[in-house]
Structure formats: structure tokens, C-alpha cells
Amino acid sequence: MNVRRGDTVLVLAGKDQGKRGTVDRVEKTKRGFGVVIQGINMAKRHQRARSRTQAGGIIDLPVPLHISNVQVVCPRCDRPTRIGHQTLESGGVVRVCKRCGEQIEVTTK
Ligand SMILES: [Zn+2]
């Protein structure tokens, strides 16, 4: 998994192509992994009032983008990049930017 919650990503496809956003959620879908990005790929849903506390109407919901349609933006070089993996002496694995080699985030196995 190369994309994680909190990453800044560039949108490669869809109506918000070219925009950047922060990953809110990564979720498993029928077609693989989808990423929900704040303010990206919003869709209007017409919703019926389900209860007295929840009013009906039109609400904006972010629709997950397929993970292949986003690219992680490196926090150091500020450019969309491919992600590499590096194994540390401690045995942990870190994601690294393929452009500048900077560690993007420390992850555990
Ligand atoms: Zn970089």
C-alpha cells in the first residue's frame, strides 16, 4: 500500500484531475483500493429524510478515487512521485520518494 491517510496526493484522472488533496481515508472496494480525498471528487446525493434528526435534501459526499488514479506528492520536493520502499537496519520498512530519496514516513511491518 503506497498511499496512506494524511498523504498529499495529486489526482490523475476524473473531474478533479490535476488537483491536490489530503487523503482522508483508504478503503477497500470491489475494484481494489479506493482513496477518499478531502474536497475531491465530490458528488451530490439526493437523500431522503431518514429520521426527524436527519433532514433530507442534497448533500455533498466525496466519492473514492481508485488508488491508481492518484499519485503521492513528496513533502520534500513537492512533486508527484513514485514511491519506493527501503528496509531499515531495524527491520522496519520506510516509503521513499523515487525522485529525491527522502523518507516519506516510517512504517512498521
Ligand atoms: Zn522527493
Image: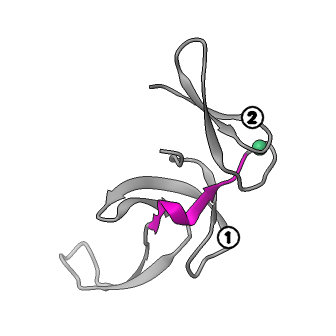
Query: What residue is shown at x 76% (from left), y 35% (from top)?
Result: 101
Name the residue nearer the viewer: 13 or 42. 13
- Scheme of image coloration: one colour
- Report crowding for label 2: few under 14, some 14 to 19, many 20 or more residues within 10 A (C-alpha): some
Image-based side of 104 in relation to 25, left or right: right
Residue 19, numbered label = 1
Q: Is residue 60 visible?
A: yes
Where residue 51 appears, x then y in whole percent? 18, 76
- Report the magenta residues as a range: 65-74
**On screen, 61 above or below 5?**
below
- Residue 105, picture quadrant: top right
Q: Which residue is mark 2?
A: 102
**Distance from label 1 to label 2 (Cα)?**
23 Å
Where residue 88 appears, x then y in whole percent? 60, 18
Image-based side of 64 in relation to 100, left or right: left
Element at label 2: loop
